[in-house]
Image: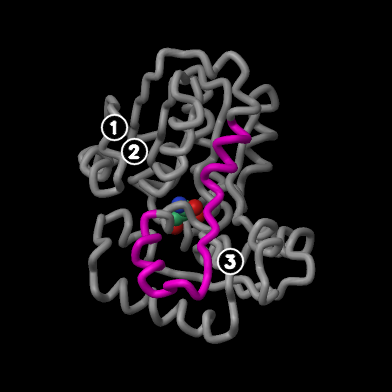
Amino acid sequence: MIGVFDSGLGGLSVLAALVEALPRADFSYFADTAHVPYGNKSEEQIQGRVLAIGEHLASRGCGLLVVACNTATATAVQALRAAHPGIPVVGVEPGIKPAAQASRSGRIAVLATEATANSQRLKHLIRDHAGHAEVFVEPCPGWATHVEMLQLDDPALAADVRARVEPLLAMGVDQIVLGCTHYSFLAPLLKQVIGTRAELVDVADAVARQAQRLAGGLALGSGRLHLHASAYPERLYAALPPLRLGHIAARVSASPV
Ligand code: DGL
């Protein structure tokens, strides 16, 4: 079984890519809905949650872990790997490198949670992979919570998206990196604002390919999917159709971890 987790619903965007890449694998997806959002929490708090969830998924027999959360990866992927040396761990990091390579203007932007925006790991990623591109990091407080509440049509969200993205476009940014897995579900809204002025960069498919490379025999399961929430399981279930994941047939359960 492959364990996948996020602070909440955002990682479902990665799960959708994983299910497409590994249709016969068995997945256990954990949404930490009792503790979402992670983006405004301290490193210690996020690490504590990541280690508890890692332990839970490992004890359920997961042989590969996918951290479907940029914030958790930036803050705690090293601690998770150290806690489970026998289990391969795939993290999600903002697509700085593909964005820098594709940029014609030499200016790219990263939309992320506060915790990811302030992380050392993002600074190192930019130093090592942005090449000569100028990188604008834009923290987007509240966006993940809107996705979590399925308030995708809220005019206040649309206004905030415009207020954050327009100045980036005005500075000549032509690649906008989705640095939080929740933001994949805001792609239609972002595209309305951006039009043809910039491209969105989402790494979900690249993460799925990396998981495919590491899956080995785990690729050959029975295609079962278990969605588990630490609270509000009905939200997880209700999220599948509006997040365009209604085709995913899953068993849903809840309990604190
Ligand atoms: N989905 C998460 C990420 O990729 C975190 C959102 C949050 O809980 O703040 O960063």
The residue mark sitting in front, 2 or 3, is: 3
Q: Which mark is residue 148?
A: none
Residue sitting at x 35%, y 26%: 226
- Residue 46: x %, y % from top left: 52, 50
Element under disc 3: helix
Question: Which residue bears the numbered disc 3?
Answer: 117
The magenta stretch spans which residues? 185-211
* Residue 201 on the magenta segment: yes
The residue mark sitting in front, 1 or 3, is: 3
Instruction: Looking at the image, tell me whether mark 2 or mark 3 is earlier in sequence order.
Output: 3
Cβ–Cβ below 8 Å for labels 2 and 1? Answer: yes
Q: Is residue 223 left or right of residue 44?
A: left
Residue sitting at x 55%, y 58%: 201
- Neighbourhood count class around disc 2 (C-alpha, 10 Å): few under 14, some 14–19, many 20 upward: many
Q: Is residue 85 left or right of residue 50?
A: right
Element under disc 1: strand
Instruction: Looking at the image, tell me whether mark 2 or mark 1 is earlier in sequence order.
Output: 2
Question: Which residue bears the numbered disc 1?
Answer: 254
Q: Give the quadrant of the C terminus.
A: top left
Tell me if residue 241 comes above or below residue 106 in the rendering: above
Q: Which mark is residue 230?
A: 2
- Which one is in front, 40 or 219? 219
- Which one is in front, 104 or 72? 104
- Residue 85: x %, y % from top left: 70, 27
Q: Is residue 228 left or right of residue 179?
A: left
Residue sitting at x 59%, y 82%: 172
- Which one is in front, 251 or 184? 184
